[in-house]
Image (cartoon, rainbow, N blue to C red):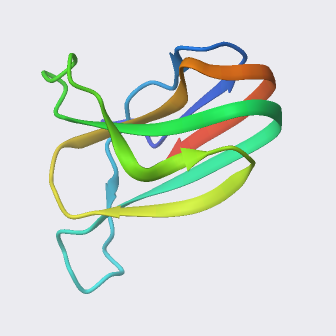
Amino acid sequence: MPAKEVTAALIAENTFTAWIIPKTANHISDAHTHFLNVSIAGTWVGTITLQRRFGSNDSESSRDITGGSWTENAEEELYDHEEGVEYRIGFKTSDYTSGTSNVRLGA
């Protein structure tokens, strides 16, 4: 069974959560919609980036999500219409300055 949430306490560059697949949103009229909750908290300086890949066999091609970067704490929801897309969140190389960011992706 896929993970319902992934969390991490990020304290360095090039660190991310594990990958997670969004949950099907049964309460939305479009049965092919999937949702993911994004939570970023803590005292930190840097840029956190949300990335996706198209299936677990696509490990070499993480792609940054347009509009999926934060420089402060945030609570957001993401909706996706494609099956099998996986997400992770974290600090890319050179994007971490200081502190601890507690991140969570929940499906």
Q: Nearer the viewer, residue 75 or 72?
A: 72
Q: Is residue 96 left or right of residue 99?
A: left
**Residue displayed at 36% across by 46% down:** 65
Res 98 quadrant in image: top right
Taking the view exactly as shown, the residue that stands out farthest to the bottom is 29
**Residue shown at the point (17%, 44%) measured from the top left:** 84
Q: Position of residue 107 (x, y in %)?
A: 44, 51
Q: Is residue 106 above or below residue 20?
A: below
Q: Which residue does the image show at 16% across and 57% down from the upper left?
A: 82
- Residue 4 in picture, x, y percent from top left: 45, 43
- Does any portion of residue 107 appear in the rendered image? no
Side of 61 where 78 appears, left or right: right
101, 6: nearer the viewer: 101
User: Please, is residue 45 above or below residue 15 in the view?
Assistant: below
Return the residue nearer the eye: 57 or 90: 90
Q: Residue at x 34, y 55 (%)?
A: 23
Above or below, comparing residue 58 to residue 81 in the picture: above
Q: Is residue 29 visible?
A: yes
Q: In the rendered view, does 90 fall on the left or right side of 29?
A: right
Quadrant of the rendered image containing residue 94: top right
